[in-house]
Amino acid sequence: MKCLVVIPTTMHNFSFSAPLAWMFHKHAENVFGIFGFELTKELAINYEFFILELNWFIELAEFKLLVEFIKANNKHAKI
């Protein structure tokens, strides 16, 4: 199972998710992480599982857009 972790970055262009890094550090061969602005159609198509991090209310709008983008390009995606 390959999983793509997407981290919304509304507040800062470059941020870091320590909880996600800790949670997935033993699964680096199966989990790939990107920031929301790096999500492409190709990535949305090539992954079956997605984890979107939502830590702050200010990221909610970008979170919604990311979910819509993934579903528009990969109807079978599990988010």
Image: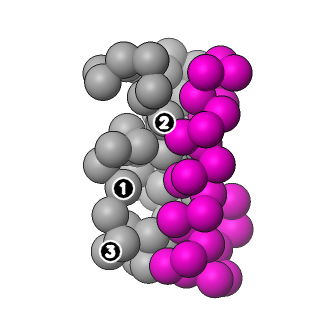
Residue 39's disc number: 1
Query: Which secondary structure, mark 3?
Result: helix
Q: CA distance from mark 3 to mark 2?
A: 17 Å
Q: Is residue 71 above or below residue 30?
A: below
Q: Residue at x 50, y 16 (%)?
A: 18
Residue 56 lies in the magenta stretch: yes
Q: Nearer the viewer, residue 4 or 15?
A: 15
Q: Residue at x 58, y 28 (%)?
A: 59
Q: Is residue 13 above or below residue 47?
A: above
Q: Which amino acid is tagged 1? A: Leu
Numbered circles on residues, count:
3
Q: CA distance from mark 1 to mark 3?
A: 8 Å
Q: Position of residue 36 (x, y in %)?
A: 41, 43
Residue that lies at the very extreme toward the bottom in this rendered image: 75
Residue 7's disc number: 2
Q: Which residue range is magenta in the image?
A: 53-79
Q: Residue at x 69, y 59 (%)?
A: 79
Q: Nearer the viewer, residue 2 or 15?
A: 15
Q: Which amino acid is tagged 3? A: Glu
Q: Residue at x 69, y 68 (%)?
A: 78
Query: As drawn, is 39 to the left or to the right of 44?
Result: left
- Disc nearer the start of the sequence (3/2): 2
Q: CA distance from mark 1 to mark 2?
A: 10 Å
The residue singled out by tag 3 in the image is 42
